[in-house]
Structure formats: C-alpha cells, structure tokens
Amino acid sequence: MALPKNLKDEFTELVTHYPESRAGLIPALHRCQEDLGGWITPEIMEDLAEFFGIEPVEVYGVASFYPMFRLTPPGENVIKVCHNISCDLRGASDVLEKAKELTGADVHGTSADGKFTLEVVECQGCCSTAPMIDLNDQFHENLTLDELERLIGGCK
Ligand code: FES
C-alpha cells in the first residue's frame, strides 16, 4: 500500500468538497507527488484508483496528461523555468539554455548524475518580476544569468 493513512484521511475529507469524488483526483495527485518522493509511482496510481473507485488506467491518463506530474523520479534539485510571455520577453529562452548547459539536463529530463531535473512551466504569477525560476520550491525573480549560475553552483 503506497498511500499512507494520513493522505487517505486527507483525501476522504477532500472529496466532500466535490459533487463527484473523482474530481478530487488532481489535488490528490499533487499531494502524493509532494509527500511521496516527488513523483507518481505505479503503486500510487493503483492506490488512488482504488480510493476513487476508478481504473488505474484512468489515473495514469490524468497523471500522464498534465506535465506537472512526474512519472519518473526527479533529481536532487528541481528547476522549473517559466516560459510564458512575460518571462519569454525578458530572456527565459536564455535562462533555459544556460540551465541546460550548467546542469547537463534536458528539458523534462534529469542530469546523468541525478543532481538536477529541469522543467519548463507555465506562468507562475511573477510576470512583473520576470524572468523567474522555481528552484526547489523557492522562486527566484528578476533572474540574471549570473544569478542562475550562482544558484546552480550552490546546488552542486
Ligand atoms: S510569465 Fe513567467 S511568471 Fe508570468
């Protein structure tokens, strides 16, 4: 059983907020990814399917559709680069290229040494301080390439 009791209890309360319990699947996937190692394992999918009374393939269909869910383990550090319009206009493409160069990770991939996972994400709500990245759940805004290099160097 991959789903611990505390999450089951949380999801039992969560589904009371929806007209159909299966509508709680996406927030449940988020919580599982947060709490259970940063990715959605096949065992978690099976447990969620059982909890929500749906087939495992339906859970897989949702988890594999949305890029914010990982189906493989992340690296030690996760870098999310926003590429929406404000960040793009203020250099997100350069940030992404530099991040690839410094980490050795491809977009939505993990470096060979397992240190870095690099992801491209949609707007994070920091458009006025673009460009930005999220490094291990910390936002870094008005980002320069020098600052990016310093941040990544600090993770090595
Ligand atoms: S476009 Fe990057 S934070 Fe909004």
Image (tube, helix red, strand yellow):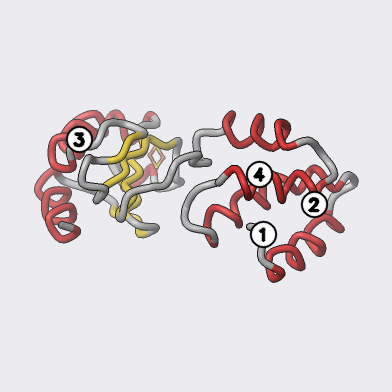
Residue 124 lies, in percent from the top left, at: 44, 45
Residue 149 lies, in percent from the top left, at: 12, 49
Which residue in the structure is indicated by mark 1? Answer: 3
* Real-space CA distance between mark 1 and mark 3, rounded to the nearest whole angstrom: 34 Å
The answer to whether marks 2 and 1 mark residues whose Cβ atoms lie closer than 8 Å is: yes
Give me the residue at 60% from left, 55% from top: 32
* Real-space CA distance between mark 2 and mark 1, rounded to the nearest whole angstrom: 9 Å
Which residue in the structure is indicated by mark 3? Answer: 100
Position of 8 with respect to 70 (left or right) is right
Mark 1 surroundings: few (<14), some (14-19) or many (≥20) residues within 10 A: some
Which residue in the structure is indicated by mark 4? Answer: 45
Q: Is residue 155 above or below residue 48?
A: below
First-in-chain label (2 vs 4): 4
Q: Is residue 41 above or below residue 34?
A: above
Position of 74 with respect to 10 (left or right) is left
* Real-space CA distance between mark 4 and mark 3, rounded to the nearest whole angstrom: 31 Å
Position of 122 with respect to 76 (left or right) is right
Which residue in the structure is indicated by mark 2? Answer: 51
Q: Residue furthest front?
A: 1
Residue type, mark 3 in image? Lys
SS at mark 1 in the image: loop
* Real-space CA distance between mark 2 and mark 4, rounded to the nearest whole angstrom: 10 Å
Residue 51 lies, in percent from the top left, at: 80, 52
